[in-house]
Amino acid sequence: MARRDSIMSKPKDTRGALRRLLRELGQFRLLIALVAAMCLCSNVLALLGPSLAGQAIQEAAAGPGQVNFERVTAYALRMLLTYLGSSLLTILIHMTMVNVSKRVARRMRQQVFDKLMRLPVGYFDRHQAGDIISRVSYDIDVISTCMATDVVSILTSTVTVAGSLVMMLSISPPLSAVALVTVPLSIGYTAHMRKQTQPRFVKRSRSYGAMNGFVEEMLSGQKTILAYAHEEAVDERFAGVNQDAAQAYYDADSLGVTIGPTMGFINNIGLSLIALLGSILYMNGLINIGAISSFVLYSRRFSGPINEIANIINELFSALAAAERVFGLLDEEEELTDREKAQTLADVRGDVALDHVAFGYEPGRRIIHDLSLKADAGRLIAIVGPTGAGKTTIINLLMRFYDVDEGAVTVDGHDVRDLTRRSLRGAYAMVLQDTWVFRGTIFENIAYGKEDATMEEVVAAAKAAHIHPFIMRLPEGYQTVISEDGGNISKGQKQLLTIARAMLYRSPMLILDEATSNVDTGTERAIQKAMRELMWGKTCFVIAHRLSTIQNADRILVVSDGDVAEQGTHAELMAKKGMYYRLYQAQFE
Amino acid sequence: MKFLWEYLKKYVRFIAGGMSIKLLGTTLELLIPYVMEHLIDRVVPLGELPPVLLWGGAMLLLAVCVRFLNVTANRMAVRTAKRSILEIRRDLFHAALNLSGGQMDRIGLPSLISRMTADTYNVQSFIQSMQTMGIRAPIMLVGGIAITLTMDAGLAAILCVMAPIMIVLVVFVSTRGIPLYEKVQQGMDGIVRVMRENITGIRVVKALSKEDYEMERFSRANEETARRDIKASIIMALPGPIVTLFLNTGLTLVVLIGARRVNAGVTEPGVILAFLTYFNMILMGVMGLNRVFMMLSKANASAGRIAEVVRLPDDLPRLAEETAAPRAREGYIVFDHVTFTYGGTIHREGEVDQARFAGAQREDCLKDIDFTIRKGGSLGIIGATGSGKTSIINLLMRFYDPGAGHVYVDGRDVRAWDRDELRRSFGVVFQNDAIFADTIRENVVFGRDVDDKGLEQALEDAMAAGFVRQYDDGTEHRAAIHGGNFSGGQKQRLLIARALAAKPDILILDDASSALDYRTDAQLRHAIAAHHGDATQIVIAQRVSSIMGLDQILVLDEGRIIGRGTHAQLLETCPTYREIHRTQMGEVM
């Protein structure tokens, strides 16, 4: 059973989160009002039960031979009806609340996802995938579970507690005084225990988290650990982590398991006191047996929810904290919408220029200081330079994943900020170093950029990318399902698939970022012809380590620390005997 | 379950003691309403205060005992769970860490991690609650029925009929519900997958303006899951109200029949009252049994999954000197006509796609590989993706055993080596090797006897000293999990430093410099030649420049050696090698 104590963080803006959560629920307000009404009825009915039972027993208490069966039967019948009604209503309430809460969860998940699609790429560079995903897989789940169960519990508990109190008072005010002893006792005890256990449970989930992290890390690196015969040391470190987790579990749970019996203890004391006091009252003729019976039943009903409410409030807070995290994501700044008069980039020639561009991912930390570059239509521009010199950043600016801080990027003379993103990005095809496939058939993966692609077109693209024979060897050919995480397809093959995808997506401009880094040289050579065809007539930006790929470039940019150190053709740069020359020579050493 | 017994049997006395205490505590708890019934029906009518106080005092005393016993038993249960899970986790981790390559392939990392985390958690919960709820629930049920039988067998008959019906009903619904929840879980996995795919591929999605399409795709997965979730939740919400209704119906019957029996003089009103209390107890017993039942089936599956790993035999046992293959020929590292297939084609359920795909993929084998490296010599291996380059290392370091032929290190069959001793002679960088969340120092030293000077030298040789120096805390700088705070090139340089640090006899670099630019790569090669010249080297690379200076080069294609010799010889004799060279170095050469 999943424990919800794993996240104990208190929401920062409780009211704000609550208000927005209520707004989310707004569209279901009629249903919720109905649920509240049903809760009321169901509990009133459930409360009537013991009273009727008490009256029936009272009738039976008349003694042997004197029982009025008609009245007993009448009471019994009414008992049955109230119980039946109450159970039916409970089922209805559950069904409604399950529907409401799951639909709210579905809507929130969709909102989060839609939001993600509108966030700038930078958001994903700054946030871990696991963290974003936990909003959907964990936080929303907490919210939905809270709504499904806690809302009903609160309604039920309130009605039950109030109703029981009224009933108890109506039966016997002196006996009700007993409740005045036990109720504060149990409330005080629960509050006290919560304060005691909470930090221990927080520590428990933290040490479990630490252990899971350790296990994940070590098992992922298992081969390395074995290769360095390091396993005993790792075993030893695990012993420590394991001990911590076990101890934290013991500390938390050995205290936690005292709560149940103690609550039972308080209830039993209450019961004893009721019995004692009831007996005395009975001996003085102030109460009858049936009334004591009913009172016992009510007092049991009374104490249950009181204990419950403390837990619920806890859960409510963690749900609000979860809601706050989800809303936090929904409030993130979106990718700027296209300018009002943004034009659609059509009939692209492919003249791209960067004009005195300055850019940094964080304010105050410039990556690119002053970059100017002109790529005429159909030209091949190569970007080389040491790792971390800012090559990928240029691509980010071309695709407008980020906007420049100063200067401008233009396509066919239009500032890219005056163009719609869709048309700008649509003008490029991209093959990146980090290849990307999704779970779906090979066909779907290749046709991803072109929704109306036919099988013939897909096959032609696959043949051009030299991946067709491999696909045909698969049991289900183009219909074979592949996935990103399954590891069922090698990196090189993934890259070929993305090349095929780009081939199918006929665009006037092309970006190749280490596009063939994972393809072995033999295959690379084989697809070079296809690549040339792909690149023919298009403005191409190519990033590559292997200098052989780019020797034919119309212009080579040597980037170093965010600035262009050199530019020119291969021959020019070699003649210059500068940085490019040194990079080039290095591969033959 | 037999597996768990192995761990629990040494605590059998302690467990038996705890269970007995729980048994006693629960039994006494059952007595409380019994005493109350006695008090109201027999003692109160006497009209004397002392006996009333006596019996009331007895109730209070019972309450005190019950709390004490239950708390003690619960704590003992937690203690047993803590101790045994500590050992289970230790053994599981140890087994997981020492799995052979084939076993690792077969089980898979995600499954292994979930066995280590989720499954051990299930087992722990079960061990704890089996000793508490496992006693309490049946006692409540059986004891409740037993006591009511002694009070009034006729009335108790109603319970005896109803209890089994309720149990069957609850268990039936629950067993129906579990598979439904599994489907919900699968749906959630699907949702998470789509999210993950979109987060990792956000650039592609945005470049192709597929945001709307992805929202639609997510929406489909989302709706389907919400639908399943609603169905499962509603079904699981049913047992509660239905059981309550059943019980209340029974209650009504008790009142009705009880009244008749009171009238006939065979029972008393107090008995009816006590019945009402015991009904509640029986209800709790039924629900508790259901919980135990569900936990048992979950823990059973989990224990099975844990046992499977812990009980795996060592499939790479050390051979005695006599049974190992006799030395084939002179040479420090010898592969003697080695043939090898990955046996890991047995796939577990749930990995169907992988099996489908991998079946085609895993033919990655070696055929008749035969070569010799002299001590201090060097070997380069080049070939297409999937040609079997890494498999050679896997056999050499004994992560797998060959199907035919033998592998020798220092004149000894690797199977006759103590595995750790064998591996200690290596310094290795694997493809996609692991950086651990630890300091740079610990990552490089990696538990070996390397002093500060050795560390500095290793970082220097691996071209890593420069960037390490840029951190304020130098070698004490911490790597994030999986080295997330380093670039690909930085990670590779740290890994190379790790391989060099202990001055290994054999140095293995498997695609270890692919993220380095040519110049850094060249400097690295110089440094290795200068400071690690006496190490025997094996270098696997995609780049000709990385291996062209080595003594001997193997060209691999589909698991066969299709060319061998020095760089110059291969340019003469091996067309494939010539091709690779020509592509990479460009026509200019």
Image (cartoon, rainbow, N blue to C red):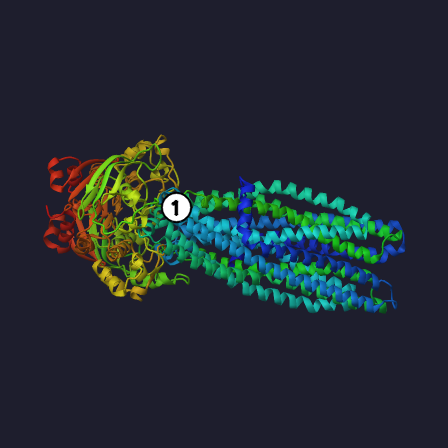
Residue drawn 61% across and 40% down? A195
Whether residue A585 is visible, yes or no, is yes
Host chain of mark 1 = A
Looking at the image, the residue that sits furthest to the front is A341
Q: Quadrant of the N terminus of chain A?
A: bottom right
Q: Quadrant of the C terminus of chain A?
A: top left
Q: Quadrant of residue A317?
A: top right
User: What x and y, as percent, mark residue B407?
Assistant: 26, 54
Q: Left or right? Give the position of B148 relative to A483.
A: right
Residue A448 vertical position relative to residue B544 in the rendered view, above or below: below
Q: Residue B95: x, y in percent? A: 43, 52
Name the residue furthest top: B472
Location of residue A230 (image quadrant) = top left
| Image side of residue A349 versus residue B187, left or right | left
How many numbered marks are there? 1
Amino acid type of disc 1? Leu
- From the image, tell me which residue sits under label 1: A119
- Asked if residue A239 shows in the view, the reply is no
In the image, A333 versus B521, the foreground residue is A333
Q: Secondary structure at mark 1?
A: loop
User: Going by the image, does A57 lie left or right of A310?
Assistant: right
Q: Is residue A193 above or below residue B1?
A: above
Label 1 Cα crowd, 10 Å radius (few <14 / some 14-19 / many 20+): some
The residue closer to the viewer here, A426 or B187, is A426
Who's the residue at 17% across and 41% down the image?
A556
